[in-house]
């Protein structure tokens, strides 16, 4: 499995506090079947994002993993918050914040006060050469009350990452219910741990993958946990995805692609 959202680098944010914790988290991840991790420190008003510091912490962690014979491949990215300064800097430096210097950018929304201009912001990021991946929308209180806001973003190319803990009910009942609704409608492209520590937010994904496989199919679980995140890690286009449900239900036929208009007639 490949985990694209993981606060593994030590001492940068509210994730791993020190190298010892990072190593322990890495060992848990490997025992759970995770082979690749994207270390994603926050880029927000609360946490300074410094690529040079991140690279130094990554090198230190890689040395420790090799010394301890922990078979985990680690790259960097970030948990990107949509502040004005962040957006301007990302557009000016499109690979500064992305996963493993790829085209893919993890985007985290504020819990409340979602701007009506978010669609325009996502469009600007895409024009700048980035593919936004929306992190854990199932945990966002505003989206929990109005999940239809996701529809337009999905139609325009947004990708969605759900937290493994939400699938298992560890993030509260509203997050669990929304996670399973998104999964049932095939709106999800990635599962990830969003690991922060060794206990309540530990880096485990296998149990959630197995539940997705049981309820929604083994092929879909493999897309979410291996094929799609590995494509992101390696900066490749995603493989052909299962058709999402109800994305175009409210669209007029004329706005649909010709092949969807054709099938809607039958």
Image (cartoon, rainbow, N blue to C red):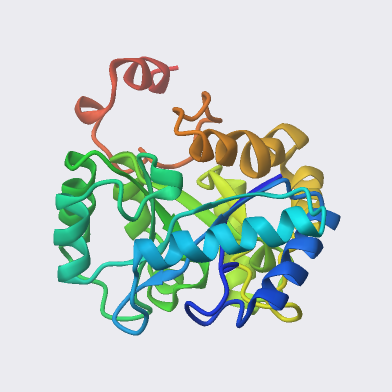
Vertical order, 111 against 213 (above or below): below
Q: Quadrant of residue 154?
A: top left
Kindly give the residue lying farthest to the right in the view shown.
31
Vertical order, 36 against 166 (above or below): above
Residue at the image point whose x is 21% and y is 50% from the top: 93
Q: Position of residue 241 (x, y in %)?
A: 53, 29
Which image quarter holds the C terminus? top left
Q: In this view, does 179 lie to the left or right of 110?
A: right
Q: Is residue 103 left or right of residue 92?
A: right
Which image quarter holds the N terminus? top right
Q: In this view, does 31 lie to the left or right of 42?
A: right
Q: Is residue 165 left or right of residue 150?
A: right
Q: Does residue 159 appear anywhere in the picture? A: yes
Compare residues 95 and 188 and report the one nearer the observer: 95
Residue at the image point whose x is 38% and y is 68% from the top: 146
Residue at the image point whose x is 29% and y is 22% from the top: 257
Vertical order, 19 against 162 (above or below): below
């Amino acid at each position: 499995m490949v985990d694209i959202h993981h606060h593994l680098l030590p001492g940068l944010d509210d994730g791993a506090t020190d190298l010892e914790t990072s190593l322990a988290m890495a060992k848990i991840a490997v025992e759970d079947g995770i082979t690749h991790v994207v270390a994603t420190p926050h880029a927000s008003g609360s946490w300074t994002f410094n690529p040079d510091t991140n690279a130094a912490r990554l090198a230190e962690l890689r040395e420790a993993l090799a010394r301890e014979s922990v078979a985990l491949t680690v790259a960097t990215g970030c948990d990107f918050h949509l502040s004005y300064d962040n957006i301007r800097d990302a557009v000016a430096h499109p690979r500064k914040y992305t996963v493993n210097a790829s085209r893919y950018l993890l985007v985290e929304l504020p819990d409340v006060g979602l701007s009506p201009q978010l669609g325009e912001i996502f469009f600007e990021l895409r024009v700048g050469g980035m593919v936004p991946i929306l992190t854990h929308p199932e945990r966002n209180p505003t989206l929990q009350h109005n999940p239809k806001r996701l529809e337009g973003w999905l139609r325009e190319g947004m990708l969605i990452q759900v937290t493994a803990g939400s699938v298992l009910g560890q993030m509260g009942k509203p997050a669990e219910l929304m996670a399973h609704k998104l999964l049932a409608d095939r709106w999800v492209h990635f599962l990830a741990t969003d690991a922060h520590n060794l206990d309540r937010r530990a880096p485990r994904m296998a149990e959630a993958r197995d539940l997705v496989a049981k309820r929604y199919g083994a092929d879909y679980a493999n897309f979410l946990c291996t094929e799609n995140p590995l494509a992101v890690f390696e900066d490749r286009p995603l493989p052909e995805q299962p058709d999402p449900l109800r994305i175009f239900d409210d669209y007029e036929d004329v706005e649909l692609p010709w092949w969807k208009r054709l099938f809607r007639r039958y």
